[in-house]
Amino acid sequence: MTTPTTSVSALLALLQQERDQLLEQFTSIPEADRTGSTGEHTPGSGWSAAQIIEHCARVEGNVARMIAKGAELPRTATAEELRTGLLTETSIGWVRNRGTKVEAPERVRPSVSITAHDALALLHASRTALLDAFTAADPAVLDGILFPHPFVGPLTLRSWMELIAHHDARHAEQLAELRSA
C-alpha cells in the first residue's frame, strides 16, 4: 500500500513519477487509437485515451484554482478537522484502486470530442498552473485550508496536491487497460 508523502521534495517526486507513468501509458497507445471511444461516457467504460488525459487535466486545473483561492480564505478549521483532512493509506488505496468504480462529477468529465494533441496541451498547462500555485502558496494555507473531495471527504490543499499523483496513477492503469482491450 502507498503511504502519504512527508516532504515537499517527496511530493514533487511523486507527482513527476506518476505523471511520467500516465504519459508513458498514453503514448503506448497507437496515435490513431487515442481519440476513439466506445460511445459511453462513464469512467472506465468508454472514455478514449484523449478523454482520460483531458479528465486528468480538468481535475488538476481545479486543484490549482483551489490552491490559489485558499490564500483568500480564513483558516477556520480545527486541529481535529485538519488532522482528518490528511490522506491516509486507506484513502490513497481507494483512489488508486481501479476496482472501485466512481462516476466523475460533471465539472471534471471530459468533452465528447477532443484531439490527443489538445488533451496533452491541457495536461501540460494544468501541471504548470498546479506547480505555480503550489510554489506561490503559503505553507500555512496548504496545511490550514480544507476543500471537500466528493468521495474522500475534506482534504487539506497539500493533500489535494498529493491526490493528483494518485489520481494520475489510477488513470495510468486505465490507459493500460484501454491499450490491452
Image (tube, grey):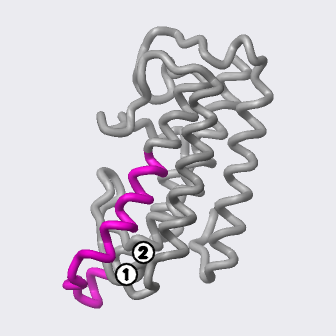
**Total numbered labels:** 2
User: Magenta span: helix, strand or loop, mainly?
Assistant: helix
What crowding class fits label 2: few (fewer than 14 Cα within 10 Å), some (14-19), or many (20 or more)? many
Q: Residue 119: x, y in percent?
A: 57, 31
Q: Nearer the viewer, residue 147 or 173?
A: 147
Q: CA distance from mark 2 to mark 1?
A: 14 Å
Question: Which residue is located at x 53 percent, y 49 percent?
Answer: 126
- The residue pinned by badge 2 equals 86
Q: Is residue 55 covered in magenta?
A: no
Q: Secondary structure at mark 1?
A: helix
- Give left or right: position of 82 versus 132: left
Compared with residue 23, is residue 141 higher up or lower down, i.e. above or below?
Answer: below
Q: In which quadrant of the rendered view does residue 4 lie?
A: bottom right
- Give left or right: position of 8 versus 159: right
Q: Nearer the viewer, residue 85 or 48?
A: 48
Compared with residue 174, is residue 76 higher up or lower down, i.e. above or below?
Answer: below
| Magenta span | 59-82
- The residue pinned by badge 1 equals 141
Task: Mark 2 or mark 1: name the one nearer the start of the chain.
Answer: 2
- Give left or right: position of 96 versus 181: left
Q: Residue 70: x, y in percent?
A: 32, 72
Compared with residue 117, is residue 58 higher up or lower down, i.e. above or below?
Answer: below
Q: Residue 118: x, y in percent?
A: 58, 28
Which amino acid is tagged 2?
Leu
Question: Which residue is located at x 63 percent, y 65 percent?
Answer: 2
Q: Residue 63: x, y in percent?
A: 42, 57
Q: Is residue 60 covered in magenta?
A: yes
Q: Nearer the viewer, residue 176 or 129?
A: 129
Which amino acid is tagged 1?
Val
- Front of the two marks 2 and 1: 1
Question: In which quadrant of the rendered image does the C terminus lie?
Answer: top right
